[in-house]
Image (spheres, rainbow, N blue to C red):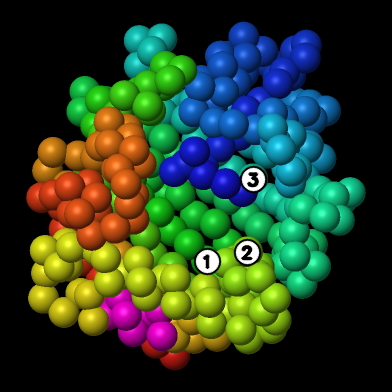
Amino acid sequence: MRPSIGCALVIALAGPVAAEPAECRRLAVVLAGLTGFAVTAPPAGPEDGWCVFDRGVLKAQGPPDLAVERLRLKGEWVDSVLVALVLEASGLRVAPGLPQSYLDPVLRETLRLQTAEVTATVRVGPEGLALRDARLRLTGGTEVKVEVDIGGAGFAAGSLLAGRLTFARIDWRNDGKFLQPVMQAWGEDLVDGATGEAWVGAARLALRQLAGNLPVSLFPGDGLDRLEAVIDALPQGRGRLVLEFRSPEGIGMAEVGIAALSGDPLGPEALARLFAGAEVMLDWQPGLAP
């Protein structure tokens, strides 16, 4: 599942789906403003305040589509105003019929065999939008937990584009297997004619070059050395990475656009401007079982 953090599901509702269909439709509209997939699913009826959908398909604008065994949505309201949206999805996987030419064959087979569980809570307050309790767990063992604060953003459609990222925390447990086909597929795009480990090496080299272009001020202490250790351990290295990003002023689409329009968007000068005033704390614990 891909982020519009990032992360995104759009629910297309047809007819009443629960004891309070108007509320479910309102949740669907809110979710549509935050996401980029369209979901169709037969309603399973109400369940302790949840809007429940079984055996749905998350339709993307482009492949891959995703299938989900059960999707549950719930809203929290204060004086009829939505202040939180809670999502739970189980049995999430790449939908059958993925075009054969879309992904590297090894990566496609890896994704086909993986299923995922996803949970997330999105809250909106005076300071903006907060993503909490977000977790992606793959059956292979990989698990990612995410927290994000976006100042000035809300549930209104398009508000994320006007928001500014001020905080993000990623807790990632690597199973030591999933990244191999991912890096191989990426490296294939980077180097024509390469095969196998050469693809992985190309992807690792690209990551090292990107890390070398990041401003030293972004990583207090030995954070940059730890980032390099993570890259060196990929893709087989099992372990736990905890990354925490903070930016007092926040980073918005304006800053990203300026970087993208520069002569070298991933060069040292563009990245220094983009991350001015920001800090990243990073901890890598190799060898831990996810």
Number of the front mark, 1 or 3: 1
Q: What crowding class fits label 3: few (fewer than 14 Cα within 10 Å), some (14-19), or many (20 or more)?
A: many
Q: What crowding class fits label 1: few (fewer than 14 Cα within 10 Å), some (14-19), or many (20 or more)?
A: some
From the viewer's perspective, is 40 left or right of 35?
right
Q: Pointer 1 and pointer 3: residues touching (CB < 8 Å)?
A: no
- First in sequence, mark 3 or 2: give its number: 3
Q: Position of residue 111 (x, y in %)?
A: 73, 63
Q: Pointer 1 and pointer 2: residues touching (CB < 8 Å)?
A: no
- Distance, label 1 to label 3, CA atoms, is 15 Å
Position of residue 150 relative to residue 49, above or below, is: below
Q: Which kind of residue does numbered mark 1 sit on?
A: Glu
In which quarter of the view is residue 161 placed? top left
| Helix, strand or loop for disc 1 | strand
The circle on residue 143 is 1
| Helix, strand or loop for disc 2 | helix
Of residues 196 and 128, the one drawn nearer to the viewer in this rendering: 196
Query: What predominant SS class does the magenta segment belong to?
Result: helix
Q: Residue furthest right?
A: 97
Q: Give the magenta-colored segment's residue range.
A: 226-232
- Residue at image x 27%, y 72%? 212
Q: Position of residue 221 (x, y in %)?
A: 11, 76
Is residue 69 visible to us here?
A: no
From the viewer's perspective, is 252 left or right of 48?
left
Q: Which kind of residue does numbered mark 3 sit on?
A: Ala
Q: Which residue in the structure is indicated by mark 2?
A: 189
Q: What crowding class fits label 2: few (fewer than 14 Cα within 10 Å), some (14-19), or many (20 or more)?
A: some
